[in-house]
Image (cartoon, rainbow, N blue to C red):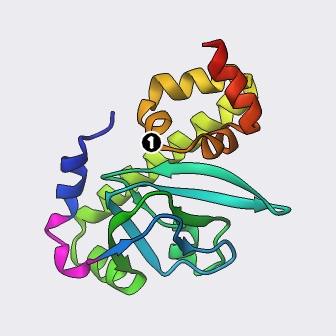
Amino acid sequence: MNKPETEKLNEWDKFSLYFKQVEVPAKTILLAEGRISRTMFFVEKGCLRTWINNDGKEITTRFFFEGDSVSSIESFRTNLPSLYSIESLEPCILKTISQQDFQNMIENAPELKKILEDHLFRRLFQSQQLLYSFLKNNPQKRYEELVEQHPHIVQRVPQHYIASYLGITSVSLSRIRNRR
């Protein structure tokens, strides 16, 4: 079960000295695919997406909103190139933390390991749900699940990003929406 946005942010409040606040406009690339992730982002206001480049075509993989944290965690923890890009879809207010400060924070606050473990488990579970939805559902059903489980995405995210996330074209998404 998801925690309320304010509760998710409050978990990190006691570590505020490690964080820097930044404001970024919409359409800002925060991490480019293939670069090493050196920053973790916590969304105070706005919307981010992760996406991959497939022969020049952007494929959206996730959306992040207020209270969410995002980084290319695999890259952030291993110093390997990121498999995806992170981009702002709206003007955002973000809290950021560097790799080194994050490592210091983890070493000085053992309770954070549990928070991080819970966060990683939620991300893994969400990724598995999306994968299984792609394997067993047609685009109509994937869209219906998105509307039911994440209505804020449909309300805030431009249609072409939603289509990309669902693995369909914008035209196909328009047809699906018109059938509803």
Residue 83 placement (x, y as % from top left): 68, 66
Report the residue that reaches farthest toward the bottom. 100
Residue sticking out furthest to the left: 14
Q: Please tell me whether residue 93 is drawn above or below residue 100 in the rendered image.
A: above
Residue bearing mark 1: 156
The quadrant in which the N terminus is found is top left
Does 43 appear in magenta? no
Q: Secondary structure at mark 1?
A: helix
**Residue 130: x percent and y percent?**
61, 37
Mark 1: give few (<14), some (14-19) or many (20+) Cα within 10 Å.
Answer: few
The stretch in magenta equals: 13-21
- Seen in the image, is 78 located left or right of residue 176? left
Q: Is residue 68 left or right of residue 28?
A: left
Tell me the residue at 55%/44% (across/down): 158
x, y percent for residue 12: 22, 63
**Which residue appears farthest toward the right when viewing the image?**
55
Is residue 59 depicted above or below 21 in this figure?
above
